Amino acid sequence: MSQETLRQFLLGCTLVNYAVLLIWFLMFAYGRDWMRRLHGRWFLLSSEQFSMLHYAGMSVYKIGILLLNLVPWAVLTFLSR
């Protein structure tokens, strides 16, 4: 795999992952009650616990995107110039 192919792959992964994060955030912001009812079937969570888990999950996911996709892409872009 060439460096340019890897760079394009990482950029594509970054965009897809940020789209997933945006959809997750929009569903949480506008469909929170629906999500809570859906998850409430399986887990007994208070409203505060539900919010905290989703907020923490989004934070960990975003950090993962940054560390595993965006930083390697930026390094490869910097090295290719």
Image (tube, grey):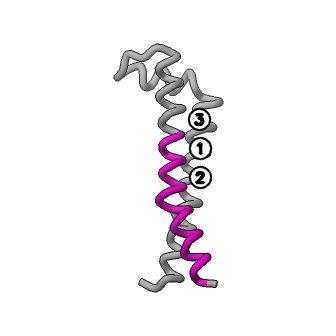
Magenta stretch: give its range: 59-80
Q: According to the image, label 2 marks what residue? A: 19
Q: CA distance from mark 3 to mark 1?
A: 6 Å
Relative placement, left or right, of 42 versus 38 is left
Q: According to the image, label 3 marks what residue? A: 27
Query: Percent x, y for residue 25?
Result: 60, 38
Q: Is residue 58 magenta?
A: no
The N terminus lies in quadrant: bottom left
The residue drawn where x is 34% and y is 23% is 42
- Which type of secondary structure does the marked residue at label 2 adopt? helix
Q: Are marks 1 and 2 in contact (CB under 8 Å)?
A: yes
The residue drawn where x is 48% and y is 42% is 60
Tell me the chief SS of the magenta region. Answer: helix
Q: Is residue 1 above or below residue 65?
A: below
Q: According to the image, label 1 marks what residue? A: 23
Q: Is residue 62 above or below residue 9?
A: above
The residue type indicated by label 2 comes to Ala
Q: Residues within 10 Å of mark 2 (few under 14, many from 20)?
A: few
Q: Are marks 3 and 1 in contact (CB under 8 Å)?
A: yes
Q: CA distance from mark 3 to mark 2?
A: 12 Å
